[in-house]
Amino acid sequence: MRGARGWGLLLPAILLLVLAFLLPVGLMVPTSFRPYVPLVGITNGFTIGYYTRLVSDSYYLEIIGRTLALGLTVTLATLVIGYPMAFFLARTTSRWRNWLTILVVFPLLLNLVVRTFGWIALLAQNGLVNQALQALGVVHEPVKLLFNFAGLLIALTHIFLPFMVLVLLGPIQNIPRDVEDAARVLGASWGSAFLRVTLPLSAPGILSGSILVFVLTISALVTPRLLGGPTYQVMSTLIYDEFLQRLNWPAGSAEALLLTVMVLALVFFSGVLARRTGARA
Amino acid sequence: MGSASPAVSGAAPALRVSRLRKSFGAVVAVADVSLDAAPSEFVSLLGPSGCGKSTVLRMIAGLVEPDAGEVVLAGEDITRVPVHRRNLGLVFQSYALFPHMTVLENVAFGLRRRGVGEAERLPRVERMLEMVRLGPLGARYPRELSGGQQQRVALARALVTEPRVLLLDEPLSNLDALLRDEMRVELKRLQERLGTTMIFVTHDQAEALALSDRVVVMEGGRVEQIGRPEEVYRRPATPFVARFLGRANFLTGTVAGSDAGGIVVAVDGGFSVVASPRPGLAPGSRVQAAIRQENIRLGPAGAGSDRANRFAATVVFHAFAGQTHHYVVQLADGRELEVTAAGSAPALARGTRALIEWGPEDVVLLAGGAAGEAAR
């Protein structure tokens, strides 16, 4: 009875998941094994070529590696910048607290394309950042910040920072202050209490925030497309081009499935990690 | 050590707090609180919530910085010493165990921070767990323990470092009634065995009376009275103390004079009561006479003895509470008094014509009879 009612509550979500996710992904599986012949289209053969080239061709390996590296560094950067922000917001008793929280979310209210164009204006050869760096005498030649890793890292970190802060906020707020006080009375300095008590107890938030930002980063399309240009590819832009520029659906399907598998594997392993460590907390 | 009250004079106090003061914004939480604790003494800070008792405790621990005053630990001024260098123990109402550590790791935490090596650490932790009867549970996590067990882990964690003073912030309040009584006995025995000086914050008067060598009664950020449990209970210094410790009836009146039997107080509204002699109350001074509910003897009309204060009354309310009967009786002038009687006595039904009586020694006279508030 109780179980049946529980499933009933999940029904809309399950329907949506099946119709909008599992079904299309399932349809992509057979497509990814069909040979694509230019000017003809998808033919009735069988090939695993689109998979083998993904794991053997250095062009594709570089894109996969770059995507993963971007995901990791953006996650790390949002964590390093976002944790102190979330910690401050969780602990401050200032009456500006709510306004500061809104300020964190504020960038999300601006259209993604607008924000990305803003970064282009800032990071271009003669953009604001380079002008400032040159005026201050830090560099003499303009630094290349567009169409490369640095540009994507900066822009994606900025765009996904609010997600990290918002996810971290709750778990940090849930850490009882008494527990930290207890550590200090027992002889732990502020730093030691933070490392041994506060940080481990915020692990669930760090884990879910990291998963969220990592998945958002490696699947981000608009920002890498605009800031990376047509040549500096990541997996999402590659898939986009495959489907819509080259019309090679089988190759695009294989690449999209690989990305999906990578994300699922990540979510699965972090779940295992959470059970190992977070289960105690 | 035993339960005999420790030397209050002679030995240097293990802890002395003088003229401690703390405001939060415009609210004065603690105003000029001074107290001390002799070595091995068990001192309670007793008061209603918001009276500043926890703030005093947190200032002793170093978690709250006082605006003024000083905290002296065994002769050393520690007012400006950071929390983690004070070598005190603190047990929280919420237990505040580290949820990501086992019982063993929880208890070992303080020793690790003090750089005690593993060879010495483990035996000490195990001995402490043995002492609080948690020997076999060292590998468990706090969430796998009952409330009483968690409380004992918190005690063990605080005591294993052999703190100079153990501070306890309402440690028993989160336990259910039966367990609370059990832990009360256990805590007291542990204290007697280890000889640790303890400062115990509570809002429960029975707890404070049962555990303490001395009780500090606080209200509105100030100390109302400091004394042995019998003292504060039998000879409350202020109306607040009389009202907070046990339930009493208050009669407001004027001192009419004294005779061989004691002081006669003319109660506003007619009758007079006789109280034991007490110096410093001149005729004409306003007083409140407090009479505890359990000190009033209630019997059927005509069955009285020769006690000095004897009045006819009518039972207007009766409730049976197991160990006691709870009555409200009405005097001839309409005034109502609350009376408790032993539960083993036969009950007097509502409407019964009765006699109430109490001796002069049962009356506590408190100077300054402002508008007499009704008994709690």
Image (cartoon, rainbow, N blue to C red):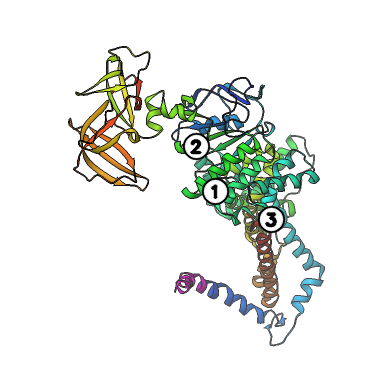
Q: Chain of mark 1?
A: A
Pointer 1 and pointer 3 on the same chain? no
**Relative height, residue B109 to residue B285 (above, below):** below
- What segment is highlighted magenta in the picture? A1-15
SS at badge 1: helix
Q: Residue at x 63, y 36 (%)?
A: B89
Q: Which residue is mark 3?
A: B139
Q: CA distance from mark 3 to mark 2?
A: 34 Å
**Relative height, residue A175 to residue B309 (above, below):** below
- Image quadrant in which the C terminus of chain B is located: top left
Q: Is residue A14 magenta?
A: yes
Q: CA distance from mark 1 to mark 3?
A: 43 Å
**Relative height, residue B176 to residue B15 (above, below):** below
Three-letter residue code for mark 1: Val
Residue A121, horizontal then vertical, whole percent: 65, 47
Mark 3 Cα-neighbour bin, 10 Å: few <14, some 14–19, many ≥20: few
Q: Which residue is mark 1?
A: A105
Residue B49, horizontal then vertical, whole percent: 45, 36
Three-letter residue code for mark 3: Ala
Q: CA distance from mark 2 to mark 1?
A: 55 Å
B367 or B99, which lies in front? B367
A174 or A241, which lies in front? A174
